[in-house]
Amino acid sequence: QLLARGETQVKKMIFTVGGGTNAKLNGGGFSYQGVRKETMGKTASGVYTVQIANTDNTHPKILFSETPNVILQQDTTLDFKIEKGIMAYSLCYEKNDSSLIDEKWRYDWNIYLNNLTGTNRKNITKWKYDDYNPTWSPDGKYIAFRRDQPSGAANLYIYDTDKDTCVGVLVSDMLDTDLPIWTPDSKKIVYHYHMIPNFAETHIINVDGSNDRMIEHNPAAFYLDNSTFLYNDDSGRVYKTNFENTFNEFIIDLRTYGGARIMDFNPNTEEILFTAILNGLNMIKSYCIGTQLMKDLLVEEGNYNFQNARWSKDFSKITFIVTDNVFDCDHNEYLTVLENGTKRRLVQISLCEQDGGYSYFHWSKLRFSPDGKYIAYGKLFMKSGTWVSLYVSIYVVETETGNIQLIDDRADYFDWNPLKPH
């Protein structure tokens, strides 16, 4: 039996002593097809070890499994559960790698997958130039990223997790594409578009590369209809519009409340999350568009400020950075969680905690795991010297225990696998 995306197929298999068999599960109305191979080695009278593994034609790839001590009798029904191969990975990110090209060492960026312990690293792009800015589609099927070409152009690519291949969505030697953002339905990608030598634009394109077109504004947060979104202008004002630009509604000026930009958005309740400093107070606030109700979620005095606030997927928790305003060796930064009105500091970084440079939380967004049990963050080390060098490491912290796990060094722009249970 193969169960995938709510659909099931069942096939019969006949086993012979010392042999193996294949069962092919074909399409029809099925989302995709898979090949399941079970080879059986006899270990005792009527007792077998069953292995389920990929073949060259297996799509999507599955995780290898082995079940010992399986007893076979006449008309025995065997139930095995397999998992899609991509589910082995929790995070995607870009990593600075080294390679030998034309007998010279070159450092380049590739897109990697890894698990929660940082022990199952996989390079999914293997490009001899640079790949940047990976972002996982909400349905878990694709990872969009920017790919630099030898011509100097930067193109829009996706990694297909089912087929384990990279596909060009928009490829041209005259284009500079960057910063892909998925619509909630995973069918379209919003991205930075620059046709050399013209001015930069914001575009949207279907995942199959069709219907590429310019849109007027760069989305900061989406509604669930996959067309309506919010955007910020450069002066703190928030507007609501859609891809067709059939309306452009002013929502709020965040500067009035000490804010600047949208940090996060709850499309179910139409609440905007933002950080603010007003009258000497540091605040995390939310504003409901429908009711026009402003809430103070956290208000504190102190010579510091709140940054980079973000909700968990169920909107029950907020993570943010607390930063000292005095930049000396006593300067500290804290990764913090706010839940039920109570804040907890999980991670501390001190400016001078490492010799030869300075340490900070990286400016990439903090990201909760899909179940809210973990937070991924970047730690930046700025090495002092004649040339300033920046090194970023990706970490994961468990929200309940505060346990910290290094995922990878010289890495950046991370995103969670939306299908992976944690």
Image (cartoon, helix red, strand yellow):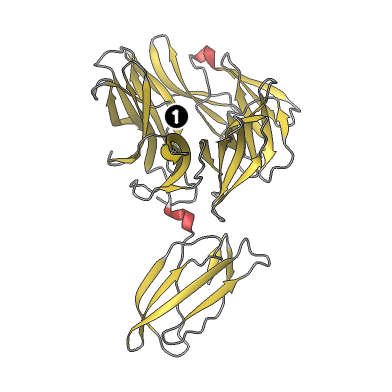
Going by the picture, which residue comes out furthest to the right?
246
Residue drawn at (55%, 75%), measured in percent from left and top?
23
Going by the picture, which residue comes out furthest to the front?
103
Does residue 415 show up? no
Choose between 86 and 154: the one closer to the eye: 154
Choose between 417 and 145: the one closer to the eye: 145
Q: Quadrant of residue 277?
A: top left
Residue drawn at (31%, 17%), measured in percent from left and top?
385
Q: Quadrant of residue 190?
A: top right
Question: Where in the figure is residue 226, as x and y percent of width and height?
Answer: 65, 39
Q: Compared with residue 113, is residue 83 higher up or lower down, i.e. above or below? A: below
Does residue 178 show up? yes
Q: Type of residue at label 1?
A: Ser
Q: Quadrant of residue 398?
A: top left
Question: Where in the figure is residue 229, as x and y percent of width and height?
Answer: 64, 31
Residue at disc 1, secondary structure:
loop
Q: Residues within 10 Å of mark 1 (few under 14, many from 20)?
A: some
Disc 1: which residue: 364
Left or right, 6 with reference to 370: right
Question: In this figure, what is the number of numbered marks?
Answer: 1
Q: Compared with residue 296, is residue 211 higher up or lower down, i.e. above or below? A: below
Left or right, 178 with reference to 415: right
Question: Where in the figure is residue 419, as x and y percent of width and height?
Answer: 49, 51
Residue drawn at (43%, 34%), measured in percent from left and top?
107
Choose between 237 and 397: the one closer to the eye: 397
Q: Compared with residue 128, is residue 52 higher up or lower down, i.e. above or below? A: below
Residue drawn at (45%, 90%), measured in percent from left and top?
74
Question: Where in the figure is residue 53, as x and y percent of width and height?
Answer: 45, 68
